[in-house]
Image: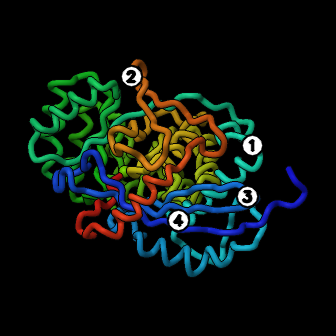
Amino acid sequence: MPESQPLIEQIILHPIAMQLVESLQTSGWHDSFRPAVLVEIHAGGQIGWGESVAGWTPGYSYETIGTTLHILSDFIIPALIGKPIAQPYITPQFRGHPMAKSAIDMALADLTARLAGKALADDGEKRRHNRVEVGVSIGIHPTIDETIAIIDKRLNEGYRRIKLKIKPKWDIELLREVRRQYPHILLMVDANSAYTSEHMTTLQKFDEFGLLMIEQPLGYDDIYQHSLLQPHLDTPICLDESIHSVDDARLAIELGACRIINLKISRVGGIHKALALHAYCLSMGVPMWIGGMLETGIGRAANLIVGGLPGVTLPSDISATSRYYDPDITDEVFTLNAEDSTIDVPSGPGLGVTVNRERLAAAEAAFNEFPKSAFMGPSA
Ligand code: MG
């Protein structure tokens, strides 16, 4: 390590739109774009990359492409330019906006590791896995038959864990048919807060389907109502949207609101915050897995690096690149090891990925060119 860290010379924001191979939902097949903001940080002759996964609309969280650009350009970037690289990066004077902050934290982590000539995956003393067990998430489709056909396709590709998006009236009948056809697959559901405590009877019926977990059945910012629900279910509740910090996780675990935590780098404000949440869950014996937000190769690499940590014992929502982008923004593509439903942790310098400048220019042009109505929100 040099005695003084290099100064942050330049931070460039790249709003992009990436054409999805398949939309995760039913509307807009073949014409949906995933917008994102990429962050490029220059220091000491190296470049680090980060990604904000906020959507065009405030659907998954309050953050959007617009708020990301605003918070980064007007506040965070002016606070960092000309300063020495600090790890972890902290701007406590600015509240909220974890996805915007996560993009900066990711780029600085990438840059710091590159300056040290190391892979991020090699950082730290914790024993890591070289492969991350992964599953696939299947959106809401018009019919049960169509959903079954997609499950069939994914199982044939080698994915061993299937996650189904559900909502009231798209649940029991669907699960009954899926279980009739696939009695033994690893199956879970994600409600993205579509239920209320009024749905207790329906949610209790899920117990008969042998699910790995029910993800975020109740309010997107709720912990208390989940703590009232969990004792009435055999199926573990996993919290996603509600967990923004170690304090949230502590509250959820101590109240018995969930038995599993979805560890999502962008939702908690960056790799360092995710590592703190990971350490807490590991100390409490709470199983974890990595949630996905339709990341490009940059965010996907970060997810795999965190996914390789011990304690991430459940299959993560990190599918192969080919399921999302063809081509991706990075030269590297992540492929599924079909023999064990895993993806390799990147081992190159930093995040282990290289941004393709030609494709970056095309994705920036697409952001400006296409009507924003074609942009998909994240559906994680
Ligand atoms: Mg989720």
Mark 1 and mark 2: Cα distance apart in space = 32 Å
Amino acid type, residue under disc 4 in the picture: Pro
Q: Disc 4 or 3, which lies upstream in sequence? A: 3
Q: Residue at x 72, y 52 (%)?
A: 112
Q: Disc 1 or 3, which lies upstream in sequence? A: 3
User: Does dot 2 land on a helix, a strand or a loop?
Assistant: loop
Furthest residue toward bottom = 74
Amino acid type, residue under disc 3 in the picture: Gln
Mark 1 and mark 3: Cα distance apart in space = 16 Å
Residue hosting label 3: 87
- Residue 132 higher or lower than 267, as above or below: above
- Whether the residues at callouts 1 and 2 have beta carbons within 8 Å, the answer is no
Q: Nearer the viewer, mark 4 or mark 1?
A: 1
Q: Residue 133: x, y in percent?
A: 46, 30
Q: Residue at x 34, y 31 (%)?
A: 161
Name the one closer to the observer, 290 or 220: 290
User: Looking at the rendered structure, which numbered label has been put on residue 338?
Assistant: 2
Name the one closer to the observer, 142 or 108: 108
* Figure coloring: rainbow
User: Does dot 4 land on a helix, a strand or a loop?
Assistant: helix
In the drawing, does residue 246 fall left or right of residue 157?
A: right
Q: Nearer the viewer, mark 4 or mark 3?
A: 3
User: Looking at the rendered structure, which numbered label has been put on residue 117?
Assistant: 1
Q: Nearer the viewer, mark 1 or mark 3?
A: 1
Mark 3 and mark 2: Cα distance apart in space = 37 Å
Furthest residue toward top = 339
User: Does dot 1 land on a helix, a strand or a loop?
Assistant: loop
Q: Residue 1: x, y in percent?
A: 85, 49
Q: Nearer the viewer, mark 1 or mark 2?
A: 1
Q: Disc 4 or 2, which lies upstream in sequence? A: 4
Residue hosting label 4: 98
